[in-house]
Image: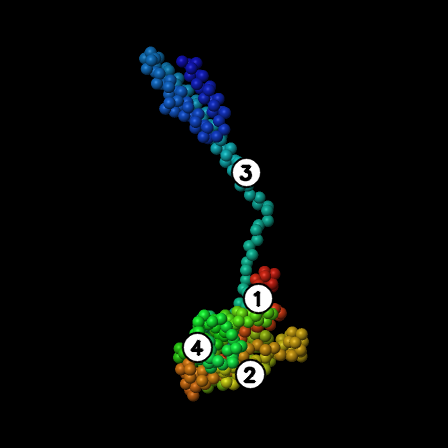
Amino acid sequence: MNEKLNAIKEEALRQIHAADTPDRLNEVRIAFLGKKGELTAVLKGMKDVDPKDRPLIGQMVNETRAQIELALEETKKGMERALQEAKLKEEVIDVTLPAKKNNVGHRHPNTIALEEVERIFIGMGYEVVEGPEIEYDAYNFEKLNIPKGHPARDEQDTFYISDNILLRTQTSSVQARIMEQGKLPIRVISPGRVFRSDEVDATHSPSFYQIEGLVVDKNITFADLKGTLEVFAKELFGENTRTKFRPHHFPFTEPSAEVDVSCFKCGGKGCRFCKGEGWIEILGCGMVHPHVFEMCGIDPKEYTGFAFGVGLERIALLKYEIDDMRLLYENDMRFLKQF
Ligand code: DAH
């Protein structure tokens, strides 16, 4: 019996040492120690053994079982250790490698310019309001004194959604919306996106941004308009900036003007930047037309007001000396990183 058990043990140990995977090791365990395993078969054969020999043989079987179990356990631990080491080797981190750089973004030049304009007007007590980009013909044109068939519509051809709904061509549409609400006095600026069916070139785009301004109160005069825009120009382009009001025509203001600022590059002498003019045009403005007041439910005998409209890109191009508007929309990191 002893020899038989020894032979079983030897064979078990041989197979255990030959096993190369945990699965194979499990097969060996089942083959020797399982219910139908070789060692179990020996125990089952005990009924044929002389009863007085049984305790001794039982003990021997148990010892053999213990030795096989020990070998299985140790081999299994060895395999796990090897696996763990291989895994660690694979996941090794080289702490001397340079780190991946996180690129931190920053504000777009348009946004920087807009925040600057907002800061100036908020400082003068204005509120910033917004209006919809998809707008009724009534707010974009009719209530601004631009009825159907008016020639001013030609300059502001746009994208129509229906006969009455379009992509707004100017933030002036917000003027009508605010006045209609009837809360007086009014002192607002309204920045936003506008659309026109223009071809793309260095100074045109089918979509760009404007900032509208509107003040309505009792006794507002052209002097208030001039003073306000003068402060604005000085804050934006520097203390020595001078302003010039040139008569112009806008259907919704009367009188109307275009405003030029003295060239902040040459101080007005004339240079390449101002194309030898000494002056640079920056916005349109005027006193709110009495008929516009009437259409928006405000009594023009009691109230007066002024309005202005600035092109945001124009401000950004001037302030940062960018010579092509397209650069603002191309998202070229080499360009954007400069601001
Ligand atoms: N909305 C005009 C445009 O797009 C600009 C403008 C001119 C706005 C005069 C005004 C204004 O508020 O008073 O050309």
Query: Three-letter amino acid code at disc 1?
Result: Leu
Q: On the image, numbered disc 2 is attached to which residue? A: 248
Depth check: give the residue in front, 21 or 218.
Answer: 21
Query: Three-letter amino acid code at disc 4?
Result: Ala
* Closer to viewer: mark 3 or mark 1: 1
Split into 4 quadrants, where in the image is the C terminus? bottom right
Q: Residues at badges 1 and 4 in contact (C-beta under 8 Å)?
A: no
Separation of disc 3 and disc 1 at Cα? Answer: 49 Å
Depth check: give the residue in front, 115 or 314.
Answer: 314
Separation of disc 1 and disc 4 at Cα? Answer: 31 Å
Q: On the image, numbered disc 3 is attached to which residue? A: 89
Mark 3 or mark 4: name the one nearer the start of the chain. 3
Residue 244, given in percent of the width and then of the height, sits at 59, 82
- SS for dot 4: helix
Vertical relation: 58 (above or below) 83: above
- SS for dot 2: strand
Q: Residues within 10 Å of mark 1 (few under 14, many from 20)?
A: some
Query: Three-letter amino acid code at disc 3?
Result: Lys
In-image side of 182 versus 150 (left or right): left
* Closer to viewer: mark 3 or mark 4: 4
Q: On the image, numbered disc 1 is attached to which residue? A: 328
